[in-house]
């Protein structure tokens, strides 16, 4: 049970900092900055603990870079040491806020995510249409330049409702102010763990307003994108007006005028990277173009020895897992052929690891189960029966 009166002391415990380090290094164990930090791990964590206790810990300037994927975004990267602090903060305050979040907020939360949100959307469209027996409409909305417009003072006011420890609030203010913008006191950097967490806390005010005050039954939010399903178009028009008024007056935000529309499922509704229809779902065309560009780029980097085959395989595997949520059998088959043409005769460490984990007496069964997906050279090198 977390005692809210001494949250900062709990933040500064060595046990919490060690857990934060473990989370910060996840999937980054081979990065040079992680290896450097871990050369003197105990000393670095102890020094960080001392600085936090003395309140002398200050974040380093953010490193920014442009990402075009496909929209142009400015990503800000914190120093690894600062990322440990971010995880340490979230370890302590996440349990306080998690229980206040509504069920249908799906971003940056355990056991949530894009695919869970899409599954929920499917359930809502069946309910709203009474299993396709009545017409219904969808308000698809987007908040204009959300991360650039988050007001720090408003966020701190919201955080104080659950965080009575002034020292922890002050540390959060220091982290927020480390992001330099043209408008002081506004905006959060894309790429920080704290930004992702605070984005949920900030818009939880909207979630509760929509669910508890406006009584919207079929509402789903993922970061700054949200949908509301309803049989009445007029009611959705009314909800859109009230939501925009609430955002402007309470959170100093507004709906994007071009991206907030009332649509019907027959023409397809784009939500979280998928083009959703009543009986099927497709990937956005931009997603298809993007994976092909990524694979071609991975091939070039592989030829120039700037990346290895495992890096390319991770890109392909991640896309494949994501695309299975849509009706993409032929597309996945085409993309697999492209990948194998780009990287003939290659095997990823992941593929070998999966094979080695299988008991010898189950290997033949495994081959028969996935013969169509395991590449011929994989069967040959690992001596599959019939190779």
Image: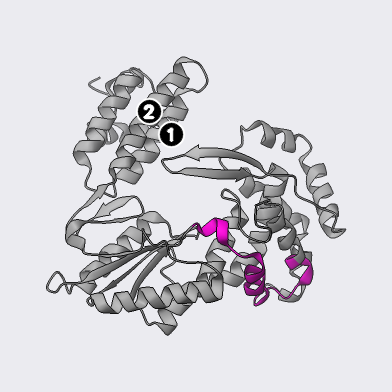
Query: 1 left or right of 228?
Result: right
| Spot occupied by residue 294 in the image (x, y as percentages of width and height) | 40, 31
283 and 350: which is toward the camera: 283
Q: Is residue 352 above or below residue 264?
A: above
> Which part of the image, by quadrant, shows the C terminus?
top left
> Which part of the image, by quadrant, shows the N terminus?
bottom right
**Does the magenta stretch mainly form a helix, a strand or a loop?**
helix
| Tag 1 secondary structure | helix
- Residue at 67% in and 64% down: 92
Q: Tell me the CA gap for discs 2 and 1.
A: 11 Å
Query: 54 left or right of 24?
Result: right
| Spot occupied by residue 288 in the image (x, y as percentages of width and height) | 30, 38
Q: Residues within 10 Å of mark 1 (few under 14, many from 20)?
A: few
Q: Is residue 152 magenta?
A: yes
| Tag 2 secondary structure | helix
Q: Is residue 98 magenta?
A: no
Residue 146 appears anywhere in the view: yes
Picture quadrant where residue 11 is located: bottom right
Boundaries of the magenta span: 145-169
Q: Tell me the tag on residue 314.
A: 1
| Spot occupied by residue 366 in the image (x, y as percentages of width and height) | 29, 35
- Residue at 58% in and 71% down: 97
29 and 221: which is toward the camera: 221
Q: Tell me the tag on residue 295.
A: 2
Residue 383 appears anywhere in the view: no
Which mark's residue is nearer the viewer, 2 or 1? Answer: 2
Q: Residues within 10 Å of mark 2 (few under 14, many from 20)?
A: many
């Amino acid at each position: 049970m977390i005692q809210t009166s001494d949250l900062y002391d709990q933040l500064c415990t060595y046990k919490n900092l060690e857990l934060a380090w473990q989370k910060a290094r996840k999937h980054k164990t081979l990065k040079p900055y992680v290896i450097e930090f871990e050369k003197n791990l105990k000393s670095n964590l102890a020094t960080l603990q001392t600085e936090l206790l003395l309140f002398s810990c200050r974040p380093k300037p953010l490193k920014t870079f442009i990402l075009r994927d496909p929209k142009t975004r400015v990503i800000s990267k914190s120093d690894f040491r600062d990322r440990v602090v971010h995880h340490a903060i979230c370890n302590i305050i996440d349990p306080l806020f998690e229980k206040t979040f509504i069920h249908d907020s799906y971003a940056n939360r355990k056991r949530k995510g894009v695919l869970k949100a899409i599954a929920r959307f499917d359930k809502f469209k069946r309910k709203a249409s009474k299993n396709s027996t009545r017409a219904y409409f969808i308000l698809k909305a987007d908040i204009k330049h959300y991360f650039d417009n988050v007001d720090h003072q408003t966020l701190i006011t919201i955080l104080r409702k659950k965080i009575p420890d002034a020292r922890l609030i002050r540390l959060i203010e220091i982290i927020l102010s480390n992001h330099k913008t043209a408008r002081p006191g506004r905006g959060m950097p894309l790429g920080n763990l704290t930004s992702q967490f605070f984005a949920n806390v900030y818009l939880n005010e909207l979630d509760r307003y929509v669910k508890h005050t406006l009584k919207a039954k079929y509402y789903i939010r993922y970061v700054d994108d949200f949908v509301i399903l309803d049989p009445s178009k007029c009611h959705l028009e009314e909800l859109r007006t009230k939501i925009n008024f609430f955002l402007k007056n309470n959170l100093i935000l507004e709906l994007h005028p071009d991206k907030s529309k009332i649509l019907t499922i027959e023409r397809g509704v784009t939500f979280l990277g998928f083009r959703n229809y009543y009986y099927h779902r497709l990937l956005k065309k931009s997603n298809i173009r993007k994976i092909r560009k990524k694979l071609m780029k991975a091939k070039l980097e592989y030829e120039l020895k700037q990346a290895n085959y495992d890096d390319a395989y991770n890109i392909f595997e991640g896309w494949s897992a994501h695309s299975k949520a849509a009706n993409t059998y032929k597309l996945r088959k085409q993309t697999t052929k492209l990948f194998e043409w780009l990287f003939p005769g290659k095997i990823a460490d992941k593929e070998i690891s999966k094979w080695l984990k299988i008991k010898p007496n189950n290997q033949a069964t495994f081959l028969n189960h996935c013969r169509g997906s395991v590449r011929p050279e994989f069967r040959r090198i690992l001596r599959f029966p019939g190779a």
